[in-house]
Image (cartoon, grey):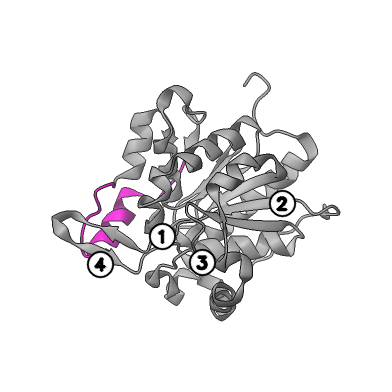
């Protein structure tokens, strides 16, 4: 696995939050259903492992406190790149880890959000079912942004920005990335064999007032704008991890990643 090189050592254990979907099926158009969806495993585990290995404590939360589902497609080794050897470890983790199997509720986290220095939302189609409709999730994004804490949204997760009303949305004008339209088409055509009701995330983000940027399809691409770190697909894990950990360290030094006038 590519190693993130950082000169600063974590001395006091700080807490990072992973917000995850517990939905396992995605309704599609024409009465179809994509089964065994959920969280994309590599997008979760590789970021989790790097952050935990640096000494950060990690909590996991879902809307209902139920165990996250893992998307069956994410078990394909092609999505793991140079980290294929970590797939068995990831599978053991989701089977045995107590925190993963008994997560906290997002409602509870929202009431106690100041104990965390950052949050990450891994991608996967599951979040398009539950997190995107969850009021507590949208409020958690607003709270972390107000506090200038690093917010990592991976692949489909930038769609959660769309759930925040425009008049209170802190990310209007930010540069943002997400799964691209071409990548959505590929997933719909060759993986899900159907179209979801909520799609074309990049186009929606632009319409809302964000500056949408993208890399090449299946490329290693992520961007950061202030406290917001977004990435494009499972092939972008390392680009995301580097930017997110840099943001965590900067937050520890400065206390906020937002601009002074904000």
Q: Residue at x 44, y 68 (%)?
A: 70
Mark closest to the chain's N terminus, 3 or 4: 3
Mark closest to the chain's N terminus, 3 or 1: 3
Mark closest to the chain's N terminus, 4 or 2: 2
Q: CA distance from mark 1 to mark 2?
A: 31 Å
* Callouts 3 and 4 close, C-beta under 8 Å: no
Residue located beneath label 4 in the image: 190
Residue located beneath label 1 in the image: 218
Q: Which x, y percent locates residue 106?
A: 54, 48
Residue located beneath label 2 in the image: 15
Tell me the magenta residue range. Answer: 176-198
Mark closest to the chain's N terminus, 1 or 2: 2
* Callouts 1 and 4 close, C-beta under 8 Å: no
Mark nearest the camera among 1 and 2 is: 2
Checking the image for residue 42, the label placed there is 3
Q: Residue at x 65, y 18 (%)?
A: 261
Label 4 sits on a secondary structure element that is helix
Q: Quadrant of residue 253?
A: top right
- Of 130 and 250, nearer the camera is 130
- Of 42 and 240, nearer the camera is 42
Q: CA distance from mark 2 to mark 3?
A: 21 Å
**Can the viewer see residue 182 in this picture?**
yes
Q: CA distance from mark 4 to mark 2?
A: 38 Å
Label 3 sits on a secondary structure element that is helix
Q: CA distance from mark 1 to mark 4?
A: 15 Å
**Can the viewer see residue 152 in this picture?**
no
């Amino acid at each position: 696995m590519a190693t993130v090189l950082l000169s600063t050592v974590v001395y006091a254990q700080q807490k990072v939050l992973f917000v995850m979907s517990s939905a396992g099926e995605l309704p599609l158009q024409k009465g179809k259903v994509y089964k065994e969806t959920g969280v994309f495993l590599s997008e979760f585990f590789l970021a989790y492992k790097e952050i935990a290995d640096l000494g950060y404590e990690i909590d996991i939360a879902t809307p209902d406190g139920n165990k996250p589902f893992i998307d069956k497609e994410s078990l394909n080794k092609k999505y793991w790149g140079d980290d294929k050897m970590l797939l068995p470890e990831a599978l053991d983790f989701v089977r045995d880890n107590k925190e993963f199997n008994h997560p906290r509720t997002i409602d509870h986290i929202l009431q106690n959000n100041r104990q965390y220095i950052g949050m990450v939302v891994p991608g996967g189609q599951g979040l398009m079912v539950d997190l995107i409709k969850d009021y507590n999730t949208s409020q958690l994004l607003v709270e972390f942004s107000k506090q200038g804490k690093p917010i990592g949204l991976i692949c489909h997760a930038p769609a959660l920005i769309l759930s925040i009303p425009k008049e209170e949305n802190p990310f209007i004008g930010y540069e943002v990335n997400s799964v691209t339209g071409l990548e959505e088409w590929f997933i719909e055509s060759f993986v899900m064999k159907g179209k979801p009701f909520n799609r074309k995330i990049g186009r929606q983000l632009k319409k809302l007032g964000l500056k949408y940027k993208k890399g090449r399809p299946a490329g290693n691409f992520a961007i950061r704008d202030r406290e917001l770190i977004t990435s494009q697909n499972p092939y972008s894990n390392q680009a995301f991890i580097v930017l997110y950990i840099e943001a965590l360290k900067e937050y520890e030094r400065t206390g906020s990643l937002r601009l002074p006038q904000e």
